[in-house]
Amino acid sequence: MFRVQSRVGWLSANAKCHLVRQARISQPHRYVLPVASQVRYEATSSLGTMGYEYKPIKRLLVANRGEIAIRVFRACSEMDIQSIAIYSEQDKNHMHRLKADEAYLIGKGLAPVAAYLNIPEIIRIAQDNHIDAIHPGYGFLSERGDFAEACIDAGIMFVGPTPEAITKMGDKVEARVAAEQAGIRVVPGTPGPVANVEEAEEFAKDHGLPIIFKAAFGGGGRGMRRVDKMEDIRDAFTRATSEALAAFGNGALFLEKFIERPRHIEVQIMGDKYGNVIHLFERDCSVQRRHQKVIEIAPAPNLKPEVRDSMLADAVRLAQNVGYENAGTVEFLLDKSGKYYFIEVNARLQVEHTVSEEITGIDLVHTQIRVTEGKSLPEMGLTQDDIVVHGGAIQCRMTTEDPAKQFQPDTGRIEVFRSGEGMGIRLDGAATFAGAIISPYYDSLLVKVIAHAKSHERACYKMERALREFRIRGVKTNTPFLLNVLRNPAFMHGAVDTYFIDENPQLFEFPPSQNRAQKLLYFLGETMVNGPMTTLATTIKPPILEPTVPPMPFSLLSSDPVVPKGWKDILTEKGPEGFAKAVRNHQGLLLTDTTFRDAHQSLLATRVRTHDLKRIAPYITHNFNNLFSVENWGGATFDVAMRFLHECPWERLETLRKLIPNVPFQMLLRGANAVGYTSYPDNVVHEFCKVAVQCGMDVFRVFDSLNYVPNLILGMEAAGNAGGVVEAAISYTGDVSNPERTKYNLKYYLDLADELVKAGTHILGVKDMAGLLRPQAAKLLISSLRERHPDIPIHVHTHDTAMAGVASMLAAAEAGADVVDVAVDSMSGMTSQPSMGAVVASVENSDRDTGISLPDVNKYSAYWEQARQLYGPFEATVTLKSGNSDIYINEIPGGQYTNLQFQAFSLGLAEQFEEIKSMYREANLLLGDIIKVTPSSKVVGDLAQFMVQNKLSATMVQDRAEELSFPLSVIEFMQGLLGEPVGGYPEPLRTKVLKGAKKVEGRPGASMKSLDFAQLKVELEEKHGIKISDRDAVSSAMYPKVFDDFVDFEKSYGPVSKLDTRTYFVGPDIAQELTIELERGKMLNIKPLAKSELNAEGEREVFFEVNGQLRTVYVRDKSATETTSFHPKAVKGEKGSIGAPMPGEIIDVKVKEGDKVEKGQLLMVISAMKMEMSVSAPISGVVKTISVQKGQKMQGDDLLLEIE
């Protein structure tokens, strides 16, 4: 405001004075000048000292949208001026419409940008609604002289320069002439717009490359193209012309010589109607990409005083020479020698005007409006001597662009918006709220963040802190890039030029955005709308239950727990060999607890989650430190974790290792198959074991599904070289106590044991995967092995399918076994392992006493009895009601027995299960009576089901083998891909099944080429866009598609492993309160509130309360959209499947189906947010299909075309 003393003479002639005896009432049609508390002066129109009429603005229309419109509306509100907005059809829900006192639709039926360029309609709306003045903002019509002239001709004030000044300064060619006339150095350039490509080529020949095209009637980087090669001039001219025409309504271009490594410095000027011109100092706008400013600084750091003074004086002199009034910016390029060149005048308010306001304390929009009304700068107290710099300011343009994808614009709905605020932070935005829609039609600016402090460095710290506080979900933003810039030492010290971004590739190295809460909401919403995301095997719904963990000493729960010594400590101290000797010298019976793996694999389809394992893990640490091992990994748990539980198996191992530091971990290694179902190159198996040890694995139970010694030895070598304890296991089948079973007799097992001991195993394992080891057989086998190898520890594993497991394990112990496998009571029996409590009680107070407390076992069992209820959807006892001694006949392994029964029931073949079991025996004999354990057991099972489904007997299979299409697993077995079975292959069945297919002789992996892990990591990073670790690469090597699906799922739905088990499997109930610990000290409180009816897009809106705030997600209802057609998406990972790089419109298609294209060839051009992007061929080939046409609107990743 003004001081009354300076205007007494003027006011006495032109104001009415009266006493105010009541509260002030807003009178929007009059400008109120506050003076003494009881006197008010109301100014009406008058003639100023220079003859200009002073006209107070009462109603002001902003011919713009978004952030700048709201910026002007706020100034109007402060000045008691009524604000009026215009809005396009696409902006009907935009915030700027709601911030104004009034708002009117414009450009109905026109394109989004064209609506705001419709001068006649803007003038009509202004006249119809008694508008006094129009503010153009920036962009759109702000630098169109014809628009300013149309306003004035209609009797409406234009808040900006005169039409003549806009025309002269807005035309960059005329501006150059004016600068030269003012004695200011300019960049060599064309005297006017270039008419065609040929003129551009002539200029390039005369002045040399590089050159740069610039739009003659606009800025902001649009219509700007740098050219370094003569052959690129034509394409650059075409693209720049098209961009300029779309952005400014005029495609005229001029050319300049490109100055290398300049700083971009601009001076903020302000002029009035009386010839007064001032500057508000300079800004440094050197941090640019695509010639668009990203971060602006005021004042320019490290600018020599003499250069600053000269540059400021030149800017003011130029403005005075052309009679410039209102706000504007004079822009220069400053080279390293200190020379600066005039490049252009922006005859409007700039996006970055905010930093000049912050360092000078002058409101530029207020000043613009007062100048338009007829005020002089001195009247407003704005003389050059009074304008000083206060500290430093930085503006960051936060945009909805993805810096990881070359700043591709992103569109969609803002699902979460939380801003950074606090002292010294200013936010200028328009779509800054949850629910805002970011459209592809306009500029990608989301919010301008301005930091002001005593110095540039302190402003950097404030800005970084504010940006880190932001949480924006639903659309990508450039925030990670801005943070990298702010942390860069060169930027911190103000030593940057326009090459800064290009020369600092580390600015594009971003930590992955977690966005955990919102991703989890999508998962919960998906389950609420479409049901469980993991197929459930039964109709049993998990209860709302949190299993009770037995109480433990406080010392164990503290941050530095007191951990009792265990066998892991012995292993760490003495190494594998010393550990094995200590086990052999131990007097009592040692136990391995299989509850964490084989027990739930057999009874609950391997579905037990880390969430429930880690809760009980500390109890094991404290109470079962004398366990030989906890079997918690390997086998089917590895792929099931990724495939069905959407957990990282390596993270499970690391998590449990931290919680159980004193008990060795044990895993199941399928020899040369590692944890897969096929053969791998040798280096894959070695790498797997190395990473497993790094993540916490100790004991490797190495087996082969056929007892094929070369495969076993490879696994042993891999585990041993990695530093693990090698437990080479004999896979047991048949019955050594039956003299009529001659194939797998005692001699066979003793000879096999000899080979394994000779190969260097630390421990000898007996793996009875089907529960066939009867008590008398156990006694015979183990006593014979003990006699043959008195110094080797013996470890026995069985399944309790026939309910004789406890007796067999006791017999094995009596015969000399050092370790036996058990499962906690509530997870034991049937196809699982024998009962831990039963074995503990049976040897209690004997020389084989386990040293484990039976009451502790009971408490442990009580936890799992409750936890097991959560896995009702996979409960084996739905179909498996008891043990069954027919296992001694059909010889089905425990886990497979459960799975086969599940499959039979789920397929409606429950009555055929007995037939399947019987046929399993027939299939085994057809294949030559093989060892049956994963993956060979799958071969037998697949053949058995194939025979049942096709009503084939063993004889029929033999007779018709040449014409039958056998399961793939059977064919691969016959080829030799699993290794060689004991006694060789069954002939002539093998020959008939293979029908001439290639046979593999010897160990399959021996002939396989080593996998290039470095190249695999490169390919995976390219495919998934994330940093790939060594363990990720191993996971992909084992299960390529499973790993890909796992990564994609995690990207979409986040850390679902943090959810409780019931919620994970079946989703939450409405109003159920969920507490989710994302990490230590970070909790989410989520309450599902409701889900909406179906909308037109086939989606339902799901409402949540998250940490007390409302959030929503949209989920497509699959049942309601089964018949709806959607545009196909590009296939991830297939280079020939080319998707839209961003949402937008196809403006040009350069190829047709059947065309041959070369890598890098231009295929299409897409436009979005007034920016054009070329789509080039990633590979050479032939265009197979084109899925779009010119003018079609696309979403990100929509399929454009396919190349083969």
Image (tube, rainbow, N blue to C red):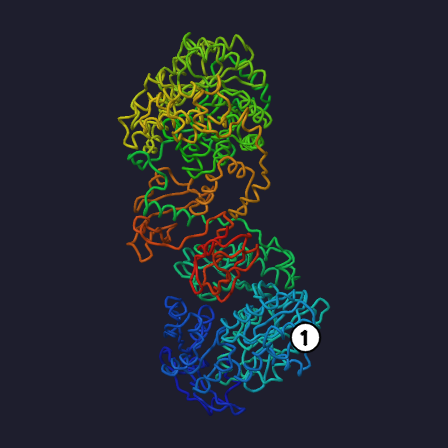
Mark 1: which secondary structure? loop
Whether residue 264 can be seen here: yes
Name the residue nearer the viewer: 460 or 536. Answer: 536
Q: Is residue 366 above or below residue 804?
A: below
Q: Which residue is mark 1?
A: 188
Residue lying at the far right in this picture: please name it: 337
Decide: few, some or many residues near mark 1? Use Cα within 10 Å; few <14, some 14-19, many ≥20: some
Q: Residue 574 placed where, x, y %? A: 60, 21
Work out whether 1021 lies above or below 905: below
Residue 532 % position (x, y): 34, 41
- Say which of 413 and 429 sits in front: 413
Q: Position of residue 1196 (x, y in %)?
A: 45, 56
Would you identify the image quadrant in which residue 927 lies?
A: top left
The answer to whether residue 555 is visible is no
On the rendered structure, is 519 left or right of 424? left
Circle count: 1
Residue 176, image x, y percentages: 63, 79
Q: Is residue 21 depicted above or below 954 in this figure?
A: below
Question: Is 548 placed above or below 36 here?
Answer: above
Quarter of the image for residue 1068 reads top left
* Identity, as a three-letter code, of the amino acid under mark 1: Pro
Identify which residue, 390 or 1115, lies in the foreground.
Answer: 1115
